[in-house]
Amino acid sequence: MPVNPTEPFALLQNIERRCLEHATGLPMQVEAEDVWTGVGFRLGRHRLVAPLAEVVEILEYPALTKVPMAKPWVKGIANVRGNLLPILDLNGFLYEASTNLTPQCRVLATNYKGVFTGVLVEEVLGLRHFRDEGKTSVLPSLDKGMRPFMKRAFWRDGEYWGVFSLHRLVETPAFLQVAI
């Protein structure tokens, strides 16, 4: 159907008609699965995951200033973009065994109820996504030192991933008592 180029409205109608003739349909709407996301990390032989909402930042092991008269698991204080961040060794706190510093070591920073803290872990394994059907109340075989900080676990690919709460850790009176 020829269109008179002097009639703008007819031209627009013609363009619309041609677009509709060649348009493909929208894809079907698919229900999104409920997926829980956390930051995976390793502590000894344990693969753990911290809720994503509890991790403010992941840092390489920073330069530290030692804190006199502090417990051995207090590594020191770091200056992170003008904020003082105490770095505490999770392995040292839980097991009284200092973490061997390697290039894989990372600090999980958390900020809960005004307590800005960095927790040293052996390795960060990246973001981990778990489907609801993998959720389990069965916790991986853990010692009594770690169990109070575990919320639940996920079973995936033949192994447990314990959900470790950094907020529960920060609320623990023993964790806040850093002086000797």
Image (tube, helix red, strand yellow):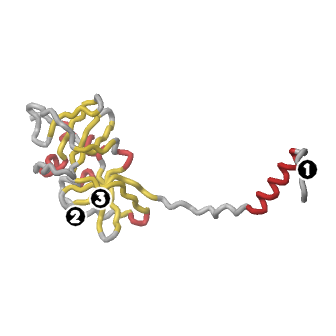
Q: Residue 4 carries which label?
A: 1
Residue 16 percent location from the top left of the image: 80, 54
Residue 19 placement (x, y as % from top left) = 76, 57
At numbered mark 2, what does the secondary structure look like: helix, strand or loop?
Answer: loop
SS category of the residue bearing label 1? loop
- Label 3 crowd (10 A; few <14 / some 14-19 / many >=20): many
Q: What residue type is labelled 1?
A: Asn
Q: Which of 177 and 22 is in front in this view?
A: 22
Which mark lies nearer to you, 1 or 3?
1
**Residue in view at x 39 percent, y 65 percent:** 134
Displayed quadrant of residue 136: bottom left
| Image quadrant where one finds the N terminus | bottom right
Give the side of residue 20 with respect to residue 172, left or right: right
Position of residue 42 relative to residue 72, above or below, is below
The residue beneath circle 3 is 162
Q: In the rendered image, which residue does mark 2 sit on? A: 141
* Res. 160 image quadrant: bottom left
Question: Disc 3 residue type?
Answer: Gly
What is the three-letter code of the residue carrying label 2?
Ser
Where does the image place residue 180, in percent across and percent down from the top left?
9, 35
How far apart are labels 1 and 3 at the CA level?
A: 71 Å
Q: Earlier in the sequence, mark 1 or mark 2?
A: 1
Q: Is residue 54 left or right of residue 95?
A: right
Figure quadrant of residue 80 = top left
